[in-house]
Image (cartoon, helix red, strand yellow):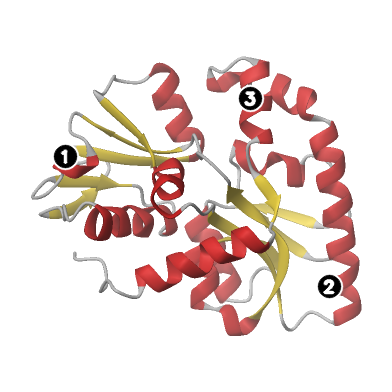
Amino acid sequence: MLRVGRIPYLNCEPFFHRLTGVELVDLIPRRLGEAMAAGRLDAGPLSLMDYLRIESELTPLPYGIGCPTGARSVLVFSDRPLSGLRGARVGITGETSTSVELLRVLLALRYEAEPAAWVAVEELCDAQLLIGDQAIRRLTGGPSARHVVDLGLEWRDWTGLPFVFARWAVASRIPVRERRAFEQALDAALDRGMAALPEIAAARRDLGWTGALIESYLRNFAFRLGPDEEKGAAEFVRMRAQLGPLPC
């Protein structure tokens, strides 16, 4: 039985709500990437940056978390616009590196507003980057901010392309027959999950959104990655290559 990493965020629910025949291991994106790199998992939806780091050890699948427009859960909260963050202290989530690198690309290449420091999101800062359910909860019931910026929408407005936050992959060591069987199971599970959105929404009202808003949120994603998503991912890789490592 394959060990499959599961990211416990709302935007991954359609994949996992009806997925059976595998052992599921709940991990935040960063930990999932580490587990795949260490060989402790056989498959999972990897944060794009984690996927790129170990791409040679993986077989990609045509599924992921693509955003044709806004992500609605990859958000910067600040009293300044992104263009005003030059010299600021920016608090970043430790749960994933992809959203952090997207913010770096936007600040450096779109706005020429590089911060003075990148700090943990819990520290005193001028802006906070939150993702996933944490971002949704802050949006619905947390402290207010003058500017709430959706990074998926920022990327789309700038490039005209979708952004890919995560993509599914199977470890290359998994036999081809087993990989193909899993891909078929995942595809069927996604169909069943999308058909069960009202059920998913009813179970996730803890986030503070109505059922209708949760369904709208989930229908907004491209879970099957097509040519546009591949172009968006390639463009991000090209832009990211212009930056150095994240300053400590």
Q: Amino acid at mark 3?
A: Ile
State the mark number for residue 179: 2
Q: Secondary structure at mark 2?
A: helix
Q: Which residue is mark 1?
A: 125
Image quarter where the C terminus lies is: bottom left
**Three-letter amino acid code at the position of disc 2:** Arg
**Amino acid identity at mark 1:** Cys
Among numbered discs 2 and 3, the one appearing first in the sequence: 2
Q: Residue at x 43, y 51 (%)?
A: 95
Seen from the viewer's position, the closer of residues 86 and 245 is 86
Give the alpha-carbon distance from disc 1 to disc 2, as whole Å.
Answer: 44 Å
Residue 68, percent from left and from top = 58, 46
Q: Earlier in the sequence, mark 1 or mark 3?
A: 1
Which numbered tag is attached to residue 57?
none
Residue at position x 57%, y 67% in the image: 35
In this view, 118 is above or below 152: below
